[in-house]
Amino acid sequence: PISLANADIAVLDGASGHPLATAASNSWESGTEQQPASWTRIEHAYLVRAAAEGVGMYFSAGDGSGVLAPSIDPFAIAVGGTTLGIGKNGQRLFETGWSDGASVIDQHNVWVLKGEEGASGGGPSIHFAQPPYQKGIVPASLGTTRSAPDISASADPFTGIALGLLKRNKTDPTGPPVYVQIPIGGTSESSPLVAGIVIAAQQGEATPFGFINPAIYKLNGTDAFFPTLPLTSTSPALYRGVECDIAIFANLCGKPPVQTLMTFDDQNPKMRFYTGQVTLPGYDNMTGLGTPDGPNFVAGLRQFEG
């Protein structure tokens, strides 16, 4: 984390008296809020500086439930994750908070819930007071201190994006590499997605948007966000989970002949690693305010930041 924080500080130090960028997407966490207080103070100091200098610091909220620094800092733009279903014609089918439960079939052919297999980080802070921009928007049931995340985008690797790679051809090691695609996800996907949308919104504006949290919370409840809604027993079965395909998700599914089922938006208190994350209409502690709704989000952000 020290070298990564130094990279952020280098952006702020800039050149000729100006920062090197107006936004920085960070796909790292330094630890829980139990990390050394000295490290929390360092992070907070440069995040306050970034906000003052017009640089938005976007931080992945983490790929497991719970609160992580520095995304929980009130001057960080904490980006959570969603499970997003897209139809074969590119239409949105559903979007819910990213919280996957993994179940396997035991020797009695009974599904047994093993625990969490990836989730958006988030929850209430144990150190930071609730910032003014969250007052009246974060439900009291989710805590009365600083809450993460602030905003979200697609992150669940089981509904993720395809990454193209060139790999060595195992059958012909001296030949040309082979092109393959693998699914990826995590809040390391969602953070740059959100930062990229904000940069697009900023184009042509007189000043950089910088720290956007006060502005985006003013957009709460508007069409600037796609609503991320909980899945229920009445949701179509295909929206509620997916078989873990070993051919695609070999690093997540276990070795054959294990059969694994990933259940989306799993809020089972008995699930190992679960820390109380929920998907709700409006603000919740997996997706924040929701996911940006393209042109509506851009127009709304320009209204308050332009």
Image (cartoon, helix red, strand yellow):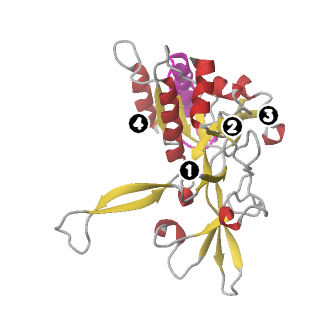
Give how far across and how far down residue 187 sits, in percent: 54, 46
Residue 70 visible in the snapshot: no
Q: Quickly name the residue at label 4.
A: 3
Circle 2: residue type: Leu
> In the picture shown, does residue 16 fall above or below 181?
above
Q: Which residue: 54% across, 25% down?
A: 47
N-terminal label among 2 and 1: 1
Extreme residue in the right direction: 141
Number of numbered discs on residues? 4
Give 139 or 37, whichever is nearer the viewer.
139
**In the image: residue 90, left or right of residue 141:** left
Quick one: label 1, few (<14), some, or many (20+) residues within 10 Å? many
Circle 4: residue type: Ser
N-terminal label among 3 and 1: 3
Task: Give the extent of the magenta segment.
Answer: 30-56
Give how far across and how far down residue 72 sits, in percent: 63, 36
Whether pointer 3 and pointer 4 mark residues with C-beta atoms closer than 8 Å, the reply is no
Q: Quickly name the residue at label 3.
A: 144
N-terminal label among 3 and 2: 3
Whether pointer 3 and pointer 1 mark residues with C-beta atoms closer than 8 Å, the reply is no
What is the C-alpha distance between the residues marked 4 and 2? 31 Å
Whether pointer 4 and pointer 2 mark residues with C-beta atoms closer than 8 Å, the reply is no
Q: Residue 40 sits in which quadrant?
A: top right
Disc on res. 263: none
Q: Quickly name the residue at label 1.
A: 155
N-terminal label among 1 and 4: 4
Give how far across and how far down residue 226 sits, in percent: 66, 41
The secondary structure type at the circle numbered 3 is loop
Circle 3: residue type: Thr
* Magenta segment includes 296: no
Q: Quickly name the residue at label 2.
A: 289
Give how far across and how far down residue 252 sits, in percent: 52, 66
